[in-house]
Amino acid sequence: MFVPIVDKDQRPLMPTTPARARKWIESGKATPFWKRGVFCVRLNVEPSARKTQDIVVGLDPGSKKEGLTVKSEAHTYLNIEADAVTWVSKAVKTRRIMRRGRRRRNCPHRANRMNRTRGGIPPSTRARWDWKLRLCKWLCKLYPITDFVVEDIKARTKGQRRWDTSFSPLEVGKRWFYEELGKLGHVETRQGYETKELRDDLGLRKSSDKMAETFEAHCVDSWVLANWWVGGHTQPDNRQMLFITPLHFHRRQLHATQPAKGGIRRPYGGTRSLGFKRGSWVSHPKHGMCYVGGTMGNRISLHSLKTGRRLCQNAKPDECRFLTFASWRVKGEGASSPA
């Protein structure tokens, strides 16, 4: 396990060992902090050297879960298994039904926009690929990443040129992702069968259970892709994993889907809870490190970072110490500190 380092200007440097990071913190040369699930240190002095090695991110996309690996030739720094964003299409459908219902009633509503959903990337596809891009941008703030190796996925073809190149949402979203990822570093792609060949050459096995929280489920492919680019190992040197689950935020709605008793509709949605942004990580005297959920009255609810289960819904805002903004929850060995 290695600790990411940033300088006083938040520029990432080569990671260090937990023992060295602990000495820097004790001597005052560095300040510890959390970056959305990963323990980091910020140097308070000028680093002795700024030379960096090539660090690559291997990415294995998936429909339910996906794997990411941060690796250099010498070390594997981080393995991530992330849940995919899967709720957007259902939310868009519900929004459309509610909006159509309001147009048939005598209540305030905006005028219909013709062909509103045509053109561009479908919302559900954009959300899936944007989630991957957000993770890559977050990793670029922790490590001096130079390259990205992605397992290329293809949509089902129909033998029709226009459909195969432009109409498939998967292909359109994938091209958008590669273009945006290219702004962060060099992008290399490998086909699925090529990943399998690389994995077989190293004698590694991939689990058939795609929902398992094991290294062999998804991270084995992301590690193989990263190792193929930078080399250095014939077997994984680090199998510790960080599990990330994106939080599902609900947009503010003027009224809920169904009217309440007496015709009064309760307020619903939003991203603020008594001064805290929902999803923010806080420290509570009783529940420890957790994240902020909804609000009721003058109290806020707190949720577990590991399971998402609600711990309480009557926490006082002044008892919660803000730690960091976040839009996901984490669990696993990758979230531990060097202390």
Image (spheres, rainbow, N blue to C red):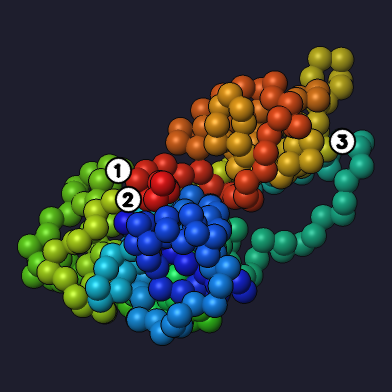
The residue furthest front is 27
Q: Measure the C-alpha gap from mark 1 to mark 3.
A: 48 Å
Q: Residues within 10 Å of mark 1 (few under 14, many from 20)?
A: some
| Pointers 1 and 2 in contact (C-beta within 8 Å) | yes
Can you tell which of label 1 and label 3 is closer to the viewer? 1
Q: Is residue 296 visible?
A: yes
Residue in front for this viewpoint, 155 or 290 = 290
Q: Is residue 296 left or right of residue 155?
A: right
Check disc 2: other Cα within 10 Å, few if <14, some if 14-19, many if 20+.
many
Nearer the observer: mark 2 or 3; the answer is 2
Residue occupying the point 41% across, 46% down: 339
Q: CA distance from mark 2 to mark 3?
A: 52 Å
**Which image quadrant is residue 200 in?**
bottom left
**Residue beneath the point at 80% across and 31% down:** 267
Q: Amino acid at mark 1?
A: Glu
N-term mark: 2 or 3: 3
Mark closer to the chain start, 1 or 2: 1
Compared to residue 123, the image places residue 330 above or below, namely above
Q: Which mark is residue 128?
A: none
Residue at the spot of label 3: 105
Looking at the rendered image, the disc whose residue lies closer to the viewer, 1 or 2, is 2
Query: Viewed as shown, does residue 94 lie left or right of 164?
Result: right
Which disc number belongs to residue 213? 1
The image position of residue 299, as x and y in percent, is 75, 25
Residue of label 2: 241
Image quarter for residue 297?
Answer: top right
Tell me the SS state at disc 3: loop
